[in-house]
Image (cartoon, rainbow, N blue to C red):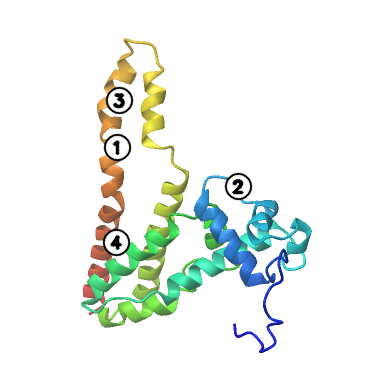
Amino acid sequence: MAQVATGSGRRGRGRPPRLSRERIVEGAVEVLLAEPAVSLTIKRVADVVGAAPMALYRYFPDRDALLQATADHVLEAMRRAPIADGPWPDRLRAWMRAAQANLRPYPQLMPYMTTTRHPAWIPGLTRLREILTPAGLCDEDLALAVALISSTMLGHAVYEGYRRPDEEMTALLDDLPRPDPTADALRPLLAGLPAAHARLYDTILDRTVTTVERLAAGSA
């Protein structure tokens, strides 16, 4: 923002930065990125933006309204993300990977992206239609493809956001008395979970894209 010639636009010493809906939402994003597992509160956001908690209520009536606005902000950023050129299956894979990377840090926003007035697939609908247009899907199959892609991305984001970390699962078994046949049988399985979770999204992504390719073949 340009300052006036007199310098009156410069913030005085000790004066808090100008507050706005945009700055508050940006503050909420900062809080969620810093500690995604800690419940976001009005006070925590107010501390980040340098304002009193009550000042935030002039812009958002409650915490839910702030979380919804933050979810909308994250989804809008996803919608604007560029997509590389190439065949539509490759573009779809790239878009789904980028979207997943953007969703992963925000488990607290998942309910506001899926069950309220702004489902997550709506901001991405134009982008998905652009990607899938070369596939030649009929309207019914296009709708099914969009629903499938959205549930794949959001379902995995929810799973990743709320599942117990692998090391905690192993620690729980280690606390069981030895010998314990159940724990002993599960330890090799749990030892493989970190590698499995690292491969999981790519696996379901490939199956999702394959399913859309089959839909496209059927439509043709």
**Alpha-carbon neighbours of circle 3 within 10 Å: few (<14), some, or many (≥20)?**
few
Q: Residues within 10 Å of mark 2 (few under 14, many from 20)?
A: few
User: Residue 100's spot in the image, x, y percent?
Assistant: 38, 60
The residue to which callout 1 is attached is 193
Q: Where is residue 189 in the image (x, y as percent from the top left)?
A: 27, 30
- Residue positioned 61% across, 63% down in the render: 68
Q: Can residue 63 be seen in this view?
A: yes
Residue 116 visible in image: no
Residue on which disc 2 sits? 39
CB atoms at circles 3 and 1 under 8 Å apart?
no
Front tag of 3 and 1: 1
Residue name at image x 28 percent, y 66 percent: 93
Vertical comparison of 76 with 207: above or below: below
Up the image or down, 24 lies above or below 175; here it is below
In contact (CB < 8 Å): disc 2 and disc 4:
no
Measured Cα–Cα span from mark 2 to mark 1: 27 Å
Above or below, 175 against 153 in this view is above
> In the rendered image, which residue does mark 3 sit on?
186
Mark 2 or 1: the one toward you: 2
Distance from disc 4 to disc 1, alpha carbons, whole Å, reads: 22 Å
**Badge 2 element:** loop
